[in-house]
Image (spheres, rainbow, N blue to C red):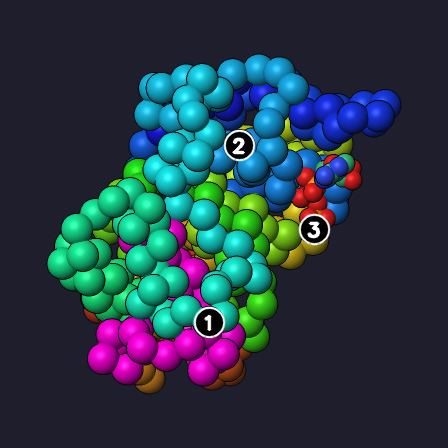
Amino acid sequence: MIELDGLTKRWPGAATDAVHDLTLTVPEGTSCALIGPSGSGKTTTLRMVNRLIEPSGGALRIDGQDALRMDAVTLRRSIGYVIQEVGLFPHWSIAENVATVPRLLGWPAARIAARVEEVLALTGLDPAVFARRRPHQLSGGERQRVGVARALAGDPPVLLMDEPFGAVDPVVRGRLQEEVLRLLKTLRKTVLIVTHDLDEAVRLGDAVAVLRDGRLAQHAPAAALLARPADGFVAEFLGSDRALQRLALIPAAPVAGAAAEGAPLAAEASLRDALAAMLARGTDAVPLAGGGAISLAAVLEQARA
Ligand SMILES: Nc1ncnc2c1ncn2[C@@H]1O[C@H](COP(=O)(O)OP(=O)(O)OP(=O)(O)O)[C@@H](O)[C@H]1O
């Protein structure tokens, strides 16, 4: 669990706080996405959690422990950190890069080697292919997988991610998001993610926290945020396609009386998937995986519920 309690950062010489009196809890095994306009304090907040930035005030607890009283280096080794540029050491092999934290933690060599293989495989990188390569011999998407593998290597309960998939094209990005989401859920990590991409925030965050000028404008489960923005600022920030984003979070349910031809949608299809399929097929109903079908009227009905 990550608990920010009145956390504040005032940069030297600044007239106002970059982050002001921020109180936010990320319960164990859940994820929270931090979003907000440029300069609203997202990265400052994230980096206060692993104390790459020292807070000016407030309290910070990680799994119940006062993180501001811990040795900062020890704290950092217990928190996974994934950044957009990945920051791999260019002259080290992928295996050596992934082994960074376990080595610093003083694990025996055999345990490190086994763990490196394990996390590479977990993140979709075949150790036989990738372990001995250097970072420049990987694609951007593969490098970002290595970034995730490295963050997981020491098996930290808490993971911080700053624009983790920012540097890859949209297709790779979507696939990485899905995979990492599934992985983090399986591993029950507590995750704080900074992103400027609302779609990514909604996909990856159980909850979403919107920052405005270093203050918390709204903190809510993704579906609630999209359905009920707290004020005009949040509504405007979420933009006009928030209704569509919300459809992606609601599973499509079959309705009586709807009949449709064609291939059924996947089992976990959302209202957005159903709508997209109707548009692509030029029909006003589509079959669902478990039997039955959903109609356009039912999509609108279920979106209102
Ligand atoms: N090292 C620093 N020294 C002084 N001021 C800083 C420093 N780092 C950030 N700031 C200021 O703190 C404020 C918050 O910056 P921060 O990087 O946290 O915003 P952000 O929401 O992550 O923005 P972006 O989306 O553009 O990355 C900004 O006004 C920024 O100029």
Can the viewer see residue 251? no
Q: Which residue is mark 3?
A: 239
Front-lying residue, 210 or 259: 210
Work out whether mark 3 precedes mark 1 in sequence or the reverse, and give the earlier one: 1
Give residue 129's quadrant in the image. Answer: bottom left
Q: Residue at x 60, y 27 (%)?
A: 54
User: Mark 1 is on which residue type?
Assistant: His
Q: Position of residue 202 (x, y in %)?
A: 50, 50
According to the image, label 1 marks what residue?
A: 91
| Count of numbered labels shown in the rendering | 3
User: Which residue corresponds to mark 2?
Assistant: 51
Pointers 2 and 3 in contact (CB under 8 A)?
no
Instruction: Judge left or right: residue 216 versus residue 164.
Output: right
Above or below: residue 137 compared with residue 83: below
Which label sits in the foreground, 2 or 3? 2
Query: Is 210 within the magenta?
Result: no
Q: Nearer the viewer, mark 1 or mark 2?
A: 1
Majority secondary structure of the magenta segment?
A: helix
Nearest the eye: 9 or 295? 9
Q: Within 10 angstroms of label 3, few (less than 14), some, or many (20 or more) residues?
A: few
Q: What segment is highlighted magenta in the picture?
A: 125-154
Q: Gap between marks 2 and 3, in whole Å? A: 33 Å
- The kind of secondary structure element at disc 2 is loop
In the image, what residue occupies the spot 32% across and 32% down?
Answer: 28
- Nearest to N terminus: mark 1 or mark 2: 2
Amino acid type, residue under disc 2 in the picture: Arg
* The N terminus sits in image quarter: top left
